[in-house]
Image (spheres, grey):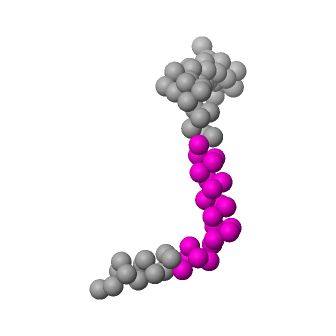
Amino acid sequence: MTSKSDPQAVSQVAVPQVADAADSASDRMPRGVRVGLVMALAALMTGALYLVAVRGEALLVDLAALGSRLWCF
């Protein structure tokens, strides 16, 4: 009889659960879709960082002007 405090018993129980979780994750989203989604998000973040680096001050001025028009009570 093993107890939950036995490290060997815990490792034998935990490994199949992790493998099952990885299999079900790949069933939900194919690898090609996942890679495409990650690449699209990376491109979007790269573009955002570029705009902040190049046009950062102008973006802040535009946001300030929009905020003053939007919240004028």
Q: Name above or below for residue 48 compared with residue 56.
A: above
Residue 36: which quarter of the image?
Answer: top right
What is the quadrant of the C terminus in the image? bottom left
Q: Position of residue 26 (x, y in %)?
A: 56, 24
Magenta span: predominant SS is helix
Pick the front one: 67 or 13? 67
Q: Position of residue 12 (x, y in %)?
A: 65, 18
Q: Is residue 16 visible?
A: yes
Residues in magenta? 40-61
Residue drawn at (57%, 20%) of the image: 23
Pick the front one: 6 or 45? 45
Q: Position of residue 39 (x, y in %)?
A: 63, 40
What is the quadrant of the N terminus in the image? top right
Q: Name above or below for residue 36 compared with residue 11.
A: below
Pick the front one: 4 or 69? 69
Q: Position of residue 53 (x, y in %)?
A: 68, 67
Residue drawn at (63%, 48%) of the image: 43
